[in-house]
Image (tube, grey):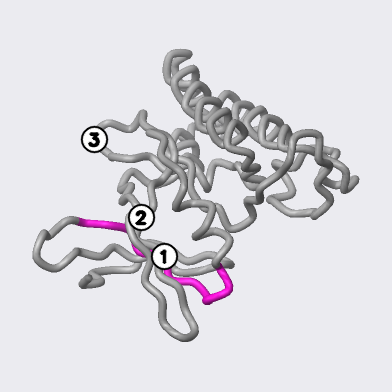
């Protein structure tokens, strides 16, 4: 792979645009500490049109590289932010069409239903972890960033307080929750879509 430019950086790693030698296929490569095995193990078993796909893993003695679908449309947080405009009274939010909101919410729900069917809780659903696949057709979302995801058993209560505060279900704060916390986070994301 030839790394061409950095796409972003987060608490758990750096993501860069990379081109595979020989095929010129473009990917997102996430470089993270070697202890990111759980994200790799969870992501490698996923195959859904609205979840970022893991194509390959590369490992060195102190880091792990995940070769993932490339989504060049930015994330949903950026998409929402771009809908603000300024006028004399201040900033106004241009509410998306109902069909756009319905498309986004349906894609989020089908991705989470797939995860929960496979006994995986994402635990960090938020606009910043929902990527737009292509800037020319901005209505295909892919759920990304599985570093806080975990496997669960039916009826199991999870207790780790994790995720992004604005999107946490109340039971996560109380440290007694189930995979359904992901549905709450989708609801908050829906509110962001509608109200900005």
| Lateral position of residue 152 relative to residue 114, left or right | right
Figure label count? 3
Helix, strand or loop status at disc 1: strand
Query: In percent of the image, x 46 and y 43: which residue is there?
Result: 46
Q: Earlier in the sequence, mark 3 or mark 2?
A: 2
Q: Are marks 2 and 1 in contact (CB under 8 Å)?
A: yes
Q: State whether the magenta stretch is mostly helix, strand or loop.
A: strand
Tag in front: 3 or 2: 2
* Residue 91 picture location, percent across and down: 54, 35
* Res. 52 visible in picture: yes
Q: Nearer the viewer, residue 56 or 182?
A: 56
Range shown magenta: 26-36
Residue 82 is at least partly visible in this image = no
Residue 16 vs 82, above or below: the answer is below
Residue 28 within the segment the image draws in magenta: yes
Q: Quadrant of residue 160?
A: bottom right
Which of pointers 3 and 1 indicates the residue nearer the eye? 1
Residue 136 — which label? 3
Q: In the image, residue 5 lies at what x, y percent?
A: 28, 68
Q: Residues within 10 Å of mark 3 (few under 14, many from 20)?
A: few
Does 123 sit above or below residue 39? above
Residue 74 in the figure: left or right of residue 179? left
Q: Earlier in the sequence, mark 2 or mark 1?
A: 1
Q: Label 2: which residue? A: 68
| C-alpha span from label 2 to label 1 | 8 Å
Q: Quadrant of residue 115?
A: top right
Question: What element does badge 2 sit on?
Answer: strand
- Residue at figure coordinates x 21%, y 56% from the top left: 26
């Amino acid at each position: 792979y030839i790394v061409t430019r950095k796409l972003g950086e987060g608490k758990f790693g750096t993501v860069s645009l990379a081109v595979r030698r020989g095929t010129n296929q473009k990917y997102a490569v996430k470089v993270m500490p070697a202890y990111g095995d759980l994200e790799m193990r969870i992501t490698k078993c996923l195959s859904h049109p609205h979840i970022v796909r893991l194509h390959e893993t590369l490992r060195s003695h102190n880091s792990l590289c995940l070769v993932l679908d490339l989504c060049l449309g930015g994330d949903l947080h950026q998409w929402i932010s771009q809908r603000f405009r300024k006028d004399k009274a201040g900033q106004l939010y241009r509410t998306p069409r109902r069909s756009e909101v319905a498309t986004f919410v349906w894609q989020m729900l089908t991705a989470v239903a797939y995860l929960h069917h496979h006994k995986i809780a994402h635990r960090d659903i938020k606009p910043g972890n929902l990527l737009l696949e292509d800037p020319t057709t901005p209505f295909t979302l892919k759920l990304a960033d599985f570093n806080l995801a975990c496997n669960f058993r039916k009826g199991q209560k999870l207790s780790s307080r994790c995720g992004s505060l604005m999107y946490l279900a109340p039971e996560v704060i109380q440290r007694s929750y189930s995979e359904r916390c992901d549905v709450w986070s989708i609801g908050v994301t829906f509110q962001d879509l509608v109200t900005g």
